[in-house]
Image: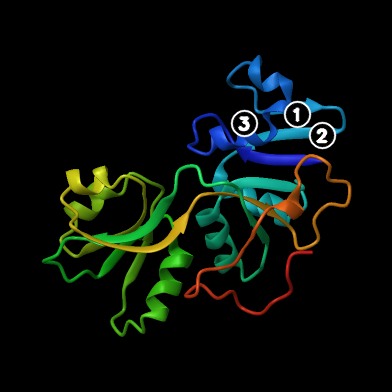
Amino acid sequence: MIVAAPGSSSRLYGPLVELVGGLFPSLATAHPRALSHHSGPDSLVFCRGFDIPELVASKVVDIGITGYDVCVEWCIANGRRLHLRALPPTRTSFVTYCTLGDRDPLRIYTEYPAITRAWLANRAEERAMRIVRLHGSTEGVIRADTRGAGVLLVTSGETLHVNGLDVEVPLLATDVCVVTREQPPDDNQLIDLDAMPVLGMPSFCAVPQRQPVA
């Protein structure tokens, strides 16, 4: 069994350790840059959170632990379904549209282009909006572009306010979740998947009807 999860620099690392730390004792003693841990036939590998849905879908790993937002973005972008289950809330954040109140935006900067397109389509936005994909630290760019807005991950909102972004529209709430293919691994004894609530997709983020990831 191979489990993939974000590493120690991620806000999701704490919940991960609570879930599987006891199963991989080397987590407590290994070098901070060690990106894989092993216990009997099972392995835990650390990688970028945004890569985890793809690794699960590609059958490189059996179980992923990452953000719900990341999984929703992957499913919409690829038109495929993964099976998402909720862990206990740890640090709820919001994927949020933001801009300045006196603007008429033409460009949206975001780490979530698929979620952004789905949200715009659901609003029946008639005006063409250019979506520019960035990879974080976006607030300054939005402030500098007088026709700019953003769809960002927001936790406290402090960075938005410091940069003068005063319009906030939450699109979806996100926290840590477990992701598997539609048919979870038969030999899983690491994580009690059946005990976890199943998560659906946000109402505005319908995934095209294609074959689920088996």
Say which element carries label 2.
Answer: strand
CB under 8 Å between discs 2 and 1: yes
Name the residue rendered at 65%, 58% in the picture: 197
Residue 34: mark: none
Image quadrant assignment for residue 97: bottom left
Residue at image x 51%, y 72%? 205
Q: Report the amino acid beneath label 1.
A: Leu
Q: Nearer the viewer, residue 93 or 136?
A: 93
Give the residue at x 46% y 66%: 115
**Where is mark 2, residue-wise?**
42
Which residue carries the number 3 mark?
A: 17
Compare residues 113 and 26 and report the one nearer the observer. Answer: 26
Q: Distance of mark 1 from mark 3, alpha carbons?
A: 9 Å
Q: Amino acid at mark 2?
A: Asp
Q: Alpha carbon of mark 2 to alpha carbon of mark 1: how far?
A: 9 Å
Depth order, front residue of 105/173: 173
Classify mark 3: helix, strand or loop: helix
Crowding at mark 2 (Cα within 10 Å: few <14, some 14-19, many 20+) = some
Q: Position of residue 102 (x, y in %)?
A: 11, 66
Among numbered discs 2 and 3, the one appearing first in the sequence: 3
Q: Which residue is mark 1?
A: 23
